[in-house]
Image (spheres, grey):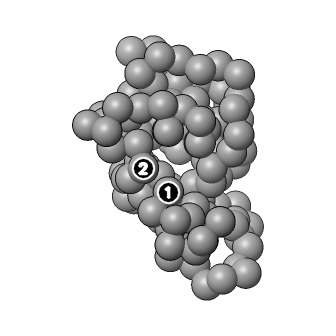
Amino acid sequence: MHIRAMQALGAPLLGRPLGAPVSKGPEPWLQVCHRCLMRLPPRAGGVDLPRRLRETLGPHSPTKSVAVSLTGCMGLCPEGRVSVRWLGGPTASEVGGIDPMKDGVELVAHLRGRAPEEP
């Protein structure tokens, strides 16, 4: 895939030098379903969601940053939502769906070490 296309999709290389590791040490790592992003209507801003997730969640992280990477289908496929899974941080998680219009605000609870509230 062309590097500009990867950056537009919010690939983990965005903001990092080419070839740099996706996550260093204890940085929380969020996987986002690429298929869910592509199925969203344009008004939901799916292509820009990984960047917005980093901006929303970074200030709440102990390391002040969050790695966000795209993944294949996770099997949940919630209509109008995006499947995500935490791979780092104080709590692990199952696959869950987030509202793309909220920019990941409902995920802040994971960074604080407690289970998120259901919408």
Based on the displayed image, in which of its 4 quarters is residue 99 positioned?
top left
Whether residue 105 can be seen here: no
Based on the displayed image, in which of its 4 quarters is residue 66 positioned?
bottom right
Residue positioned most to the left: 43
In the depicted view, which residue is nearer to us: 70 or 107? 70
Q: Residue at x 33, y 43 (%)?
A: 45
Residue type at mark 1: give it: Leu
In the depicted view, which residue is nearer to us: 36 or 24? 36
Circle 1 is placed at which residue position? 9
Residue 32, how many percent across, how many down?
Answer: 59, 42
Horizontal placement of 73 versus 116: left or right? right
Residue 24, how many percent across, how many down?
Answer: 71, 70
Quarter of the image for the C terminus: give it: top left
Upstream in sequence: badge 1 or badge 2: 1
Residue 47, how many percent across, how many down?
Answer: 42, 50
Q: Residue at x 31, y 39 (%)?
A: 42
**Badge 1: few (under 14), some or many (20 or more) residues near its Cα, within 10 Å?**
many
In the depicted view, which residue is nearer to us: 36 or 119? 36
**Badge 2: few (under 14), some or many (20 or more) residues near its Cα, within 10 Å?**
some
Asked if the residue at tag 2 contacts the one at tag 1, i.e. Cβ–Cβ closer than 8 Å, the answer is: yes
Residue type at mark 2: give it: Val
Horizontal placement of 30 versus 116: left or right? right
Quarter of the image for the N terminus: give it: bottom right
In the depicted view, which residue is nearer to us: 105 or 3? 3
Residue positioned most to the bottom: 17
Horizontal placement of 1 versus 108: left or right? right
Q: Which mark is residue 47?
A: 2
- Regarding mark 2 in the picture, which secondary structure is present there? helix
- Regarding mark 1 in the picture, which secondary structure is present there? loop
Up-down relation of residue 113 to residue 16 (above or below): above
Q: Residue at x 42, y 58 (%)?
A: 51
Q: Which mark is residue 104?
A: none
